[in-house]
Amino acid sequence: MVPADGAGDAGCDPCQAFNPTMNPTYLTAGVHRFSSVRIPSGVVVMLDTSGTAASSATLDLQVSGEVVIDGTIDLSGGLGSASSLNIGSTTEGRAGTGGLTGAPRTAPAGPGCAFTAGAGGTGGLGAFSSVGTCMPGSSTACIAMPFVFAAPFARGGGGGVFTGLRAYGSGGGGPAGGGPGALEAVPPSTAAMGAIDCMGVLGGGGTAPGRGGSAGSELYDGEDGNTGVSQCPGASGVPAAFLGGGGGGSIGAAAAADLAVATTFQPGSGGGGGSADYAFRPGAGGTSGGGGGGGALRITSTTSITVSGSLLANGGAGGNAFVGTDMAGGCSPQPGAAGGGGSGGVIFLRAPQITTTSTARLSAVGGLGRLASPFATGGRSGAGGLGRIRLSVPSAGCALGGTFAPPLASACAPSSVAGSTFVAPYPG
């Protein structure tokens, strides 16, 4: 029997060779045992996200023979999407949605409404985001006018919102998801007219609004989003609209302390969705969703692994800020805020012989944060934090070329330097 962590003899009795020819080819999440693996150039293997099949965002290939990858295995997180207007309207639109964790896809857009929330991404193993005391907005139907609401919880990238009032995007899911965009306190001028707030909207692992997920290390932390205002104040002393960009996701402190991937074979975290407060200001607007976290890929062979193609577990980029209009356009529609990037995931290769050629690419980096609207002083989002790569291979059986991100510290020599690929002797 193969141990749960993929170590030891990847026995295979009975099992078959995996030689996909269809592009893309989908595998369900979890453990797969093969006699050999050969992915040809031009073929991309991804996780099946139908139903709940990709809920773990992990792919563990345990192979008794050789592994040859000339194509691609892509467990990158999906992109967050931007908010958009309904045709011919400046007060109705669609909220941005979150990217899936471990699959390069984006949650579907909901209906065009005056008040709506974007769907959060799915996938992953860590904590869900939290809506706290806020009313959860619907991502599938138009909702009645509330004074304050939040996008529903997410396990991948957080969703954004479309609103003419005060609303929070959802935090990113995962062990250290990015926080939703932060907003300034309800101004006394709008409170006097009935505006209220809620509390406790957090990213996975408890990340506060506007903050990137924390790993206790700048190398792996998600970046913070920032808060600002649009150009047009409201009447009766109401300040210009507040806009908050989502924080970037992180692998979290436990994973950052386990570069050997001994106990934390798990995907990354999603970025937070953007937030906005347009209550008693002119117009309406929308915010964008966060990117999903990179997935977790492990390949174990008892003979050899050769990579000339790509192994990817990158975080998805957040959605761009809704640009809106400036003072001359009356801020109708209003500018929005961007979604945070998802963190990188993990790639783990173990074999007595590992070769990566000059064309190989192994990457587990965080997704990009996005800029604020040019018509606002804030609403920029944070990038996702760095992921991990681990190799278990004897120096005599090791030949490493191509590109690695995190980078190699000392080629095939054992290395445990933070921010670089972890290399240890086989079986490790």
Image: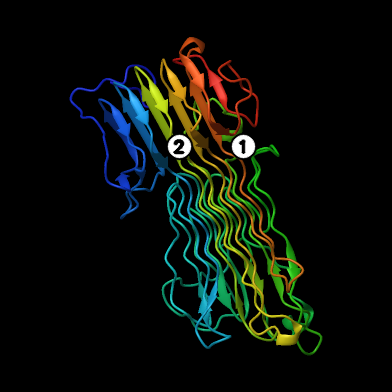
Residue at 62% x, 56% y is: 179
**318 is higher (above) or lower (below) than 331:** above
Question: Is residue 297 rendered to the left or right of residue 250?
Answer: left
Residue 70 position by quadrant: top left
Label 2 crowd bin: few (<14), some (14–19), many (20+), radius 10 Å: many
Numbered-mark total: 2
In the depicted view, which residue is nearer to us: 384 or 71?
71
The answer to whether 425 is drawn above or below residue 239 in the figure is above
Residue 332, compared with residue 308, is above or below; it is: below
Residue to which mark 1 is pinned:
253
Query: Dividing the image into 4 quarters, which one contains the N terminus?
Result: top left
Q: Nearer the viewer, residue 42 or 12?
A: 42
**Crowding at label 1, few (<14), some or many (≥20) Cα neighbours within 10 Å?**
some
Rendering coords of residue 31 (x, y %): 32, 34
Amino acid marked by disc 1: Ala
Q: Where is residue 167 in the image (x, y as percent from the top left)?
A: 61, 72
User: What secondary structure is marked by label 2?
Assistant: strand
* Mark 1, secondary structure of its residue: helix
Label 2 vs label 1, nearer the camera: 2
Q: Residue at x 70, y 53 (%)?
A: 224
Q: Pick whichever of labels 2 and 1 is earlier in the sequence.
A: 1
Identify the image quadrant of residue 122: bottom left
Residue 23 pos. (x, y %): 31, 48
Where's residue 199, x and y in %? Answer: 64, 64
Cα distance in 3D space between marks 2 and 1: 24 Å
Q: Can residue 197 be seen?
A: no
**Amino acid under disc 2:** Leu
Contact between labelled residues 1 and 2, with CB atoms less than 8 Å apart: no
- Say left or right for 14 vs 394: left
**Residue 60 shown left or right of residue 78 in the figure:** left
Q: Residue 377 carries which label?
A: none
| Res. 311 mark | 2
